[in-house]
Image (cartoon, rainbow, N blue to C red):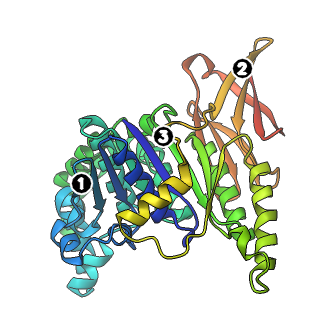
């Protein structure tokens, strides 16, 4: 199975590009499902599906053709399907504080639930093997990064916190019941979390396998979009997720050169496209002209798909490079981590329980050390040619 994630700043045309890619894959004979993870869904609108059909689906896949399905995840429906006892405990907890029932229900959907539920579907479709291709229309950049970081966070919680918390609650519940009427999580709550995590096992390996998964960053030729795309590119690399293409959407055609209103825009876009090609090299850059009308319906999506990919098969991995590697050098080791645009300001490297943790500003990434390097300690680091090199020596 091939998994393609589309990420980008809000408004760049990410959903339309995702839909066009899925349409093209299906037309080439690949059984494809395109899933929207953006809470403000517009995937169904791109295919011009009737509103009643989307409501009737309740967040489950909708068949568009023999080879193409779309899905807009509905977190309210997913709560009932998968979160069960966890959601009911949180709802009860908020309700005991005196909050209105409706407010309690809304607050019980915690940040991250959408991302975790989405990962569940990724793992489900990958394990079942029903589809040849899974296209994911990610939410805007910040939430996209939370999506790819979630497996690491969950693994850390289950390894370090879950069992401790569970054992403490076993002891604390009988005592707490005598002192307060505030509910504490019961054993069903912990079983629900454990079962949920079991369903997610292995999804982190799927996301960092460059033969299976890659990200395509959708951008517009504008300065603010370019800056955010650079940050996304850096973060995806630090998380170990392969970026195999940058798609520059809504490029003005040369025919507007003599138009007074657009001539400056054309020059600005040309300059930014040159910058994008240089900054993201050697990752391929696809430029897509601004179409003469909105892209709605399968006919328009087919036209857009040809403008993006030409005769190229979108299922291909356009670019592949290891996000990090371990290099032996005179008995010591170097972790060579792909980190374009990284700066020294706010950067720190430390070791914790068999992992190297890289912190940069408000970002954190974990690199798990192989068993033979567990006794090695970081002795220094330097940024060189778009890579962060971390030097390890035996303690």
Work out how far the residue at label 3 is from the one at label 2, CA to CA, in angstroms: 35 Å
Q: Which residue sits at x=52%, y=43%?
A: 311
- Which label lies toward us, 2 or 1? 1
Comes first in the chain, label 3 or label 2: 3
Q: Is residue 322 left or right of residue 111?
A: right
Picture coordinates of residue 204, whole percent (x, y): 43, 39
How many labels were placed on the picture? 3
Marker disc for residue 313: 3
Reading the image, the residue beneath label 1 is 65
Q: Nearer the viewer, residue 217 or 302?
A: 302
Comes first in the chain, label 2 or label 1: 1
Does 111 sit above or below residue 348? below
Reading the image, the residue beneath label 2 is 327
Comes first in the chain, label 3 or label 1: 1
Does 180 sit above or below residue 229? below
Element at label 3: loop
Does 118 sit above or below residue 92? above
Element at label 2: strand
For the residues bearing labels 3 and 2, Cβ distance under 8 angstroms: no
Work out how far the residue at label 2 is from the one at label 1, CA to CA, in angstroms: 49 Å
């Amino acid at each position: 199975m091939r998994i393609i994630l589309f990420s980008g700043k809000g408004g760049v045309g990410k959903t339309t590009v995702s839909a066009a890619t899925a349409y093209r894959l299906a037309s080439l004979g690949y059984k494809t499902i395109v899933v929207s993870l953006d809470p403000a869904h517009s995937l169904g609108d791109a295919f011009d599906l009737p509103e009643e059909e989307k409501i009737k689906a309740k967040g489950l896949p909708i068949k568009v053709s023999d080879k193409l399905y779309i899905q807009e995840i509905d977190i309210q429906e997913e709560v009932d399907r998968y979160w069960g006892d966890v959601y009911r405990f949180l709802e009860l907890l908020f309700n005991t504080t005196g909050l209105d029932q409706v407010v309690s229900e809304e607050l019980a959907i915690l940040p991250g639930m959408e991302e975790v539920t989405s990962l569940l579907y990724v793992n489900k479709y990958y394990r079942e093997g029903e589809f040849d291709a899974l296209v994911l229309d990610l939410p805007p950049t910040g939430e996209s990064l939370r999506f790819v970081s979630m497996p690491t966070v969950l693994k850390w919680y289950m390894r370090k916190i879950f069992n401790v918390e569970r054992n403490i609650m076993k002891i604390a519940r009988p005592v707490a019941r005598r002192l307060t009427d505030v509910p504490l999580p019961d054993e069903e709550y912990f079983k629900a979390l454990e079962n949920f995590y079991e369903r997610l096992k292995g999804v982190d390996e799927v996301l960092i396998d460059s033969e299976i998964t890659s990200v395509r960053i959708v951008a517009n030729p504008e300065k603010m979009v370019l800056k955010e795309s650079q940050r996304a590119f850096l973060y995806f690399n630090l998380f170990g997720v392969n970026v195999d293409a940058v798609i520059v959407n809504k490029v003005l055609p040369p025919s507007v050169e003599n138009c007074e209103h657009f001539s400056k825009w054309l020059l600005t876009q040309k300059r930014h496209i040159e910058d994008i090609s240089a900054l993201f090299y050697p990752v391929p850059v696809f430029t897509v002209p601004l179409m003469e009308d909105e892209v709605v319906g399968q006919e328009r999506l087919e036209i857009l798909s040809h403008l993006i990919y030409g005769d190229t098969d979108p299922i291909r991995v356009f670019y592949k490079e290891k996000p990090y590697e371990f290099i032996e050098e005179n008995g010591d080791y170097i972790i060579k981590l792909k980190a374009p645009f990284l700066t020294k300001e706010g950067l720190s490297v430390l070791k914790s329980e068999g992992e190297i943790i890289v912190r940069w500003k408000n970002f954190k990434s974990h690199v798990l050390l192989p068993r033979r390097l567990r006794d090695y300690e970081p002795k220094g680091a330097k940024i060189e040619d778009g890579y962060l090199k971390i030097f390890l020596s035996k303690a």
